């Protein structure tokens, strides 16, 4: 209930939300400008679209959807979904069910069918990070499905327990996401 405490809190929150929406800034990709919610910039100058939350990946001079295609040494191949299909990525071979090949040489793993992307010498998932112009990873400001203060920081089912991402500024303590400032106010008091 963000607005229950005071009208001032409400106004401040509304201002923060407005700033977040307009913070959907245009980024540079070579000569082009793009919204990071709509495109991914590969190698500093090549845009591929994001449609229905699916990141299209670069393969040579094309963009492809990993459901249907795979990239072997920068050439597009059908993704046959056959566990025995092996494609070349430089000197290595990979199953397109488990990896994607970037720049003809660099493998990044998939997680539950979702591709991770290359950032310098690392791989990242776009929900969690952005890759800046210096090929450094930056945590995303707010994951849309991050767990708020006092929320459960893991989900358990038949297959075991899996961690969930706490919202920025929160840490997982026990099985809850908690604001470290609640636990040690002196450390976090900023005076405002
Ligand atoms: C892929 O590229 C590597 C290095 O450029 C090369 O050694 C290899 O033979 C290529 N593989 C295929 C199947 O073309």
Image (tube, rainbow, N blue to C red):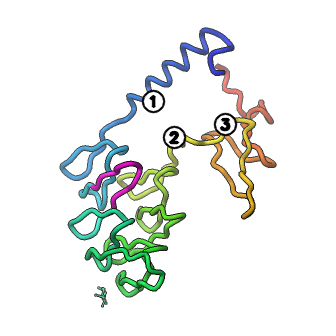
- The picture places residue 43, in percent across and down from the top left corner, at 30, 62
- Whole-Å distance between the Cαs marked 3 and 2? 14 Å
- The picture places residue 179, in percent across and down from the top left corner, at 72, 36
- Looking at the rendered structure, the secondary structure element under dot 2 is loop
Front in this rendered view, residue 67 or 49:
67
CB contact under 8 Å: marks 2 and 1: yes
Instruction: Give the magenta range.
Output: 48-57
Number of numbered discs on residues: 3
Q: Is residue 168 above or below residue 12?
A: below
**In which quadrant will I find the N terminus?**
top right
The residue lying at 54 percent from left, 64 percent from top is: 112
Front in this rendered view, residue 97 or 143:
97
Q: Label 2: which residue?
A: 141
Q: Residue furthest left?
A: 31
- The picture places residue 131, in percent across and down from the top left corner, at 42, 54
Q: Label 1: which residue?
A: 20
Front in this rendered view, residue 19 or 145:
145
Q: Label 3: which residue?
A: 148
């Amino acid at each position: 209930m963000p607005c229950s405490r005071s009208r001032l809190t409400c106004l401040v929150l509304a201002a923060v939300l407005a700033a977040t929406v307009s913070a959907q800034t245009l980024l540079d990709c070579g000569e082009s400008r793009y919204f990071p919610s709509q495109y991914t910039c590969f190698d500093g100058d090549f845009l591929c679209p994001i449609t229905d939350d699916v990141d299209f990946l670069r393969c040579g001079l094309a963009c492809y959807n990993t459901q249907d295609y795979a990239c072997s040494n920068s050439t597009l191949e059908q993704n046959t979904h056959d566990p025995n299909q092996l494609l070349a990525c430089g000197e290595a071979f990979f199953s397109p069910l488990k990896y994607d090949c970037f720049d003809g040489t660099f493998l990044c793993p998939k997680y539950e069918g979702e591709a991770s992307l290359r950032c310098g010498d690392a791989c990242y998932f776009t929900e969690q990070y952005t890759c800046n112009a210096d090929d450094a990873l930056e945590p995303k400001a707010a994951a849309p499905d991050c767990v708020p203060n006092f929320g459960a920081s893991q989900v358990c089912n038949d297959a075991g327990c899996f961690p969930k991402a706490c919202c920025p500024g929160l840490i997982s303590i026990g099985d809850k996401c908690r604001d470290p400032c609640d636990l040690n106010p002196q450390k976090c008091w900023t005076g405002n």
